Amino acid sequence: MFVNQILGQETLKKQVLNDIKEGYVPHSQCFIDDSGRGGLALAVAFAIEMLWDENHINTKISEGKSISYFIEHPDLHFIYPVATSASVNSKPKCDDYIQPWRDFVSNTSYGSSNDWMLSIGSENKQGNISVDEIDLLFKKLNLKSFSGGPKVCILWGVDKLNVQSGNKLLKLIEEPPTNTYFVFVAESELDLLPTIKSRCQLSFLKPINSSIIKSELINKGCESNLAEFYASNSEGSLGKALESFQNIEQLRGHEQLFIQCLRGAFKASGNKSVVIDLMSWATIVGALGRTLQKEFLLYSLNFIRQALLVSFKTNSLVKFQSLTNFDINKFAPFVHSGNAVEMIRLLEETCYAVDRNANGKILFSDFALKMTRILNKKES
């Protein structure tokens, strides 16, 4: 990804280029990217500017070289979360997935950690950066530079480091090898280890303007009305908008599942036999992979938010567009000041439990029963 290909982030792009031009590049910097705003793309663009001469870049582009050529530079090192999969069943390392990773960077640089896990067939696992990975990085960075110039390490997912890996990395960034630069990308500042955070220059990526996202979606073949819907619901994230566009059938499935739960929860208060249907629903959702479970819950959160906006008659802010001909105006009165906070808390806590590898069937059985109680609350 070249700097001129990154959407939005104009101020940050100018800052990065100016730092390189003036020779004031920090040895450790971290881009805080709240999912899909271009943190990885910006880190890669920085590395290319540091490692490649501008004339050489232009020459190679004229020869038809793509971004994949430039990220194979021997002085560019990547660290990213990995997990076991069908191809790697023991002690996975970044090097085991280097080709899938390069494909991901080239084609899905606005993707999330969930997208990465799906791409390597590890959708039911949590990615991890091990202590051994940091040890291996230490050895690589202490080798002489291949080109005689700087070395750049991009660590994507630094907020997912555990304490042991973080402490090992800390020693490396406190005394970095000569002419070595670290670029970290994190989704959340709050999840950064304080020791790592205190030694980095933090830069926050801003939400991308919805009109820019809409134009990008249309360029990729999305219909104008759907592009506007996806862009307005993306929260400034091109990654989320692209995911919605590319996985429309999956979104339709999420909508159908959540509506099925809501209808069952509403009926269960007057017909206890419906609880059996809710348990069947919980079995279906519980059998999904953890990544799909999280995406379903995040979709449901936005669904409730949209219903709440309709309920409070703030129609100008409503961006909901059903993929199953569901009328949100009829459902909206059931989301009100008496139960909205509880409903949102239930969804967030369930999402947290999925992250902690809770048993799916038990978790969503509990979710369905609690939703029954919350949804049937009267407005106070």
Image (cartoon, rainbow, N blue to C red):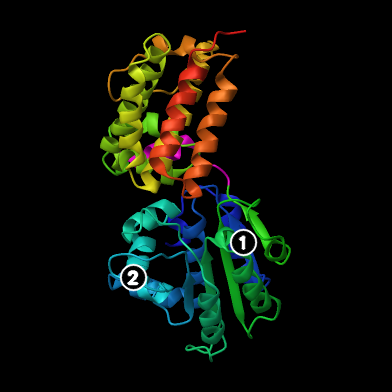
Observer-nearest of 241 and 189: 189
Q: Which amino acid does label 2 sit on?
A: Asn
Pointer 1: what residue? Answer: 30
Q: Residue 114, percent across and down?
A: 41, 52
Magenta residue span: 206-218
- Residue at the spot 33% in from the left edge and 16% down from the top edge: 273
The N terminus sits in image quarter:
bottom left
Q: In this view, does 341 lie above or below 148?
A: above
Q: Residue 40, percent across and down?
A: 48, 59
- Residue at the spot 66% in from the left edge and 72% down from the top edge: 167
Pointer 2: what residue? Answer: 89
Q: Residue 327, percent across and down?
A: 35, 13
Residue 118's image quarter? bottom left
Q: Main secondary structure of the magenta part?
A: helix
The C terminus sits in image quarter:
top right
Q: Is residue 269 above or below residue 141?
A: above
Q: Is residue 188 visible?
A: yes
The 10 Å Cα crowd at callout 1, few under 14, some 14 to 19, many 20 or more, is many
